[in-house]
Image (tube, rainbow, N blue to C red):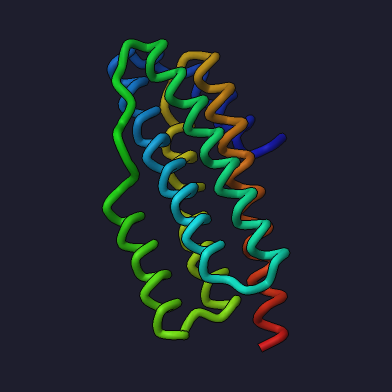
Amino acid sequence: MAYTEAIAADTLTTGPTLGNDEVVDVLNDLLENARDGEYGFRACAEEVKDPATKQLFANRAEQCRQAGVELIALITTYGGTPASGGTASGALHRGWVHVKGSLGANSELSILESCERGEDAAVARYRKALKQNLPLEVRRVVSMQADGAQRNHDQIRDLRNAARTRE
């Protein structure tokens, strides 16, 4: 059983389902997370030289953008207003990637390490969301996105490990 399925099975049996305002709060947190991922992967794509790595980051940015579109639709369905941007910590993280790049300090390894930290944060936010008793249709979308964030994390971790052996 996948991690998200285990959490889903566990939380569906406890407590009342969240109300619309609470669902919107959870979804807006994940929307900010998706935007952080989109902007962060784009920032990393701008700093790397390797075309394959650049394309990987661009693809990940697009996946995060699509996740945001799904979340916006759910937020609207539940009567909410979508958050307008990412988080302050995400902006700070992207700024640091660009500063390191402008100083010539951005190796492929350091960029992958930065991406992995961002993915750690994304996975943690999805885990937190899945501990909530979300309506089934929301849980389904959040669970699929959580699995995608975990796959992103694992791929970035594996690329980081490979880069460490080359440096």
Q: In which quarter of the image is the N terminus?
A: top right
Question: Which residue is at a point 60% across and 34% down the rendered structure image?
Answer: 4
Q: Position of residue 127 (x, y in %)?
A: 48, 40
Is residue 12 left or right of 86 when viewed as pictured? right
Question: Which residue is at a point 55% across and 32% down the rendered structure image?
Answer: 7
Question: Which residue is at a point 36% across and 16% down the rendered structure image?
Answer: 18
Q: Outermost residue, bottom direction?
A: 167
68 to 134, vertically: above or below: below
Q: How many marks on residues? A: 0
Is residue 49 left or right of 20 when viewed as pictured? right
Task: Depth check: give the residue in front, 124 or 64.
Answer: 64
Task: Depth check: give the residue in front, 163 or 99.
Answer: 99
Q: Where is residue 59 in the image (x, y as percent from the top left)?
A: 64, 49
Q: Image quarter for residue 51? A: bottom right
66 to 136, vertically: above or below: below
Q: Image quarter for residue 154? A: bottom right
102 to 35, vertically: above or below: below
Question: Which residue is at a point 40% across and 84% down the rendered structure image?
Answer: 103
Q: Position of residue 78 (x, y in %)?
A: 37, 12
Q: Position of residue 113 (x, y in %)?
A: 53, 71
Q: Quadrant of the C terminus?
A: bottom right
34 to 121, vertically: above or below: above
